[in-house]
Amino acid sequence: MAVKLAESTKKWAVIGVTTDQDKYGYKIFKRLRDIGAEVYGISPKYCEACGCSLYNNVCDIPDGVEVAVFVVNPKIGLGYIKDCAEKNIRTIWLQPGTVSFEILQEAKKYDLDVVQKCVLVETSHMV
C-alpha cells in the first residue's frame, strides 16, 4: 500500500524540514521534489531549504495536499494532527521514530489514515 500511495500522491507536505543535508527532514523533502511531486515544507525554524520557501505551519500551505510526512519528535508531531485534519489532509505518513500511542490515538480521533514506513525506502524505485 505504501508504494502505491507514494506513486499516486502528487501533493505532499513534509513536517520537520531542515537545512542540514544529513538529516531526514532534508532528504525526504528533496527526494519528493526529485521524483516530481509538489511538496510544501513545514519548519518553524527555517525559511528555505533546497531553494524553496518553507511554511511555518500546516495551516499556511495551499489546499489540496494529500499526504503529510512527519519527520519530527512525536511530542511535536502530536500538535500537527489537528492542523492536518483541518486542512483536509487525510493521510499522515509517520517516519520511523515519529510514532507514539498519542499520535495514533489523535489520528484515529480525526479519522486520518496512517502510514508507518520510511518514505525514502518506499520511493527508492522512483528515482
Image (cartoon, grey):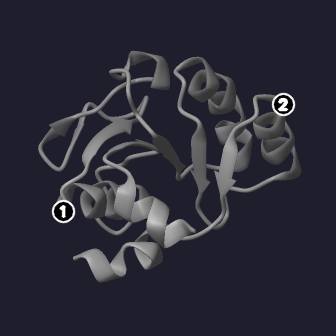
User: Residue beneath label 1, please?
Assistant: 34
Q: Secondary structure at mark 1?
A: helix
- Where does the N terminus fall, quadrant-wise? bottom right
Q: Nearer the viewer, residue 121 or 71?
A: 121
Task: Relative to 71, say whether 105 is above or below.
Answer: above
Q: Residue 112 location in percent, x, y?
A: 69, 38
Q: Nearer the viewer, residue 85 or 83?
A: 85
Q: Which mark is residue 109?
A: 2
Residue at left offset 33%, top offset 57%: 26
Q: Callout 2: few (<14), some (14-19), or many (20+) C-alpha neighbours within 10 Å?
A: few
Q: Is residue 3 left or right of residue 55?
A: right
Residue at left offset 45%, top offset 78%: 121
Q: Nearer the viewer, mark 2 or mark 1?
A: 2
Q: Residue 57 location in percent, x, y?
A: 46, 23
In the displayed orientation, state which residue is furthest to the bottom.
125
Tell me if label 2 and label 1 are in contact, CB under 8 Å.
no
